[in-house]
Image (cartoon, rainbow, N blue to C red):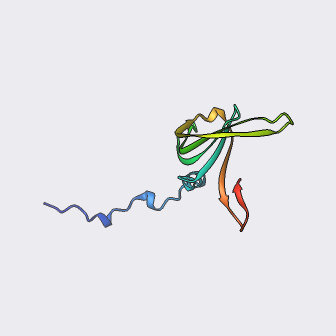
Amino acid sequence: MSNPPHSSSFIDRHDYEEEPLPLTRLKSLLTKPLRITISDGRTFIGSFMCTDQQRNTILTNTEEFRFRDDGKGGRESGLGRYVGMVMIPWKLVRRVEMEYSGLVGDEGYT
């Protein structure tokens, strides 16, 4: 009876292939806070968990914000509410922003 090869002798070809840049960028967003604005004006802020082939996006620990006209051509902030985990269909997405912390005193979404 022959012994199976030692696990370290196996070479997985995937270990030497580079991941496509878009996938690397997407993976770098995992668990990061995102702000997603959808077509009806609502904004969701939560931690990015995953996406699917149709680009539907799942956020966890999410808050939903509704904005209304302030009567002067601007938007007035409404109160937010905790909605937990949400799936946002890509066809509704109008804007996706990631929170960043750049220079001292320069924090926000881009």
Q: Residue at x 62, y 36 (%)?
A: 90
- Image coordinates of residue 105 in percent, x first then y, are 73, 65
Please state, as top left, top right, bottom left or bottom right, where the N terminus lies in the image. bottom left
Would you say 94 lies left or right of 50 here? right
Would you say 98 lies left or right of 62 here? right
The reply to whether residue 53 is visible in this rendering is no
Q: Quadrant of residue 57?
A: top right
Q: Residue at x 69, y 64 (%)?
A: 102
In the image, residue 60 above or below residue 68: below
Residue placed most toward the observer, 22 or 89: 89
- Number of numbered discs visible in the structure rendering: 0
Would you say 69 lies left or right of 31 here? right
- Image coordinates of residue 108 in percent, x first then y, are 70, 56
In the image, residue 27 above or below residue 105: above
Q: Residue furthest right?
A: 72
Residue placed most toward the observer, 32 or 63: 63
Residue placed most toward the observer, 55 or 104: 104
Residue placed most toward the observer, 3 or 18: 18
In the image, residue 61 above or below residue 41: below
Q: Residue furthest bottom?
A: 104
- Image coordinates of residue 78 in percent, x first then y, are 70, 38
Q: Residue furthest front?
A: 79
Q: Quadrant of residue 56?
A: top right
The reply to whether residue 109 is visible in this rendering is yes
